[in-house]
Image (spheres, rainbow, N blue to C red):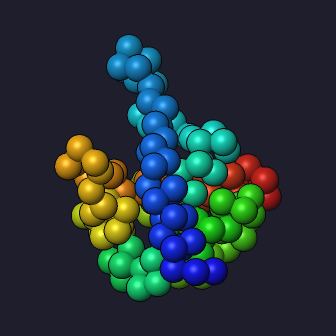
Amino acid sequence: MTTNDQTQIIRDRLNIPRQPVPKQKPGERVKNFDETYLRMDMDAALVEAARCIDCPSAPCTQACPVHNDIPTALKMLEDGDVLGAAGVFRQTSTLPEMCGRLCPQESLCEGACVVGFAIRPDGSNHPPVAIGRLESFITDSERQEIG
């Protein structure tokens, strides 16, 4: 693959919008103890995973306290291998389902995400890949599939 091909792939991935995460309405939240942010669906998760540009130095992995191999997990998810992606997260964390919810991703892995530093034509930054939401999606899917 040529450098021009790689550059075009990155440009294409940067043009993928960040996928919205469903959220409970306030009127519903006051009546239950369910999570505020609901689970992404598979289609949204696949699209969000495709936003990862697979950086060679993976600053997201370096910023992660347990050094999750985030690009590999997101590539596996993008390819539809949810259980494989969960296995990647479980190599470095015994509770990835908690990390995806409680870890301050905005200042760690997502804060280091190169996509979040890329500048749009209007001068604003692209939003980083939703790594924490994807980790939650992956581990929730694993639990649904294997119990």
Residue lying at the far top in this picture: please name it.
27
Q: Quadrant of residue 128?
A: bottom left
Q: Residue at x 59, y 75 (%)?
A: 72
Q: Please provide percent x and percent y for residue 64.
A: 37, 76
Q: Residue at x 23, y 44 (%)?
A: 122
Give the left or right position of residue 131, taking residue 91 as reference.
Answer: left
- Does 67 sit above or below residue 13? below
- Does 133 sit above or below residue 113? above
Residue lying at the far left in this picture: please name it.
123
Q: Please provide percent x and percent y for residue 56.
A: 46, 84
Query: Looking at the image, can residue 14 be seen?
Result: yes
Q: Quadrant of residue 2?
A: bottom right
Q: Please provide percent x and percent y for residue 16.
A: 49, 48
Q: Residue at x 51, y 36 (%)?
A: 38
- Does 100 sit above or below residue 27? below
Q: Quadrant of the N terminus?
A: bottom right
Of residues 109 and 96, the one nearer the viewer is 109
Of residues 24 and 4, the one nearer the viewer is 4
Give the left or right position of residue 49, taking residue 132 as reference.
Answer: right
Number of numbered discs visible in the structure rendering = 0
Query: Looking at the image, can residue 65 be seen?
Result: no
Q: Quadrant of the C terminus?
A: bottom right
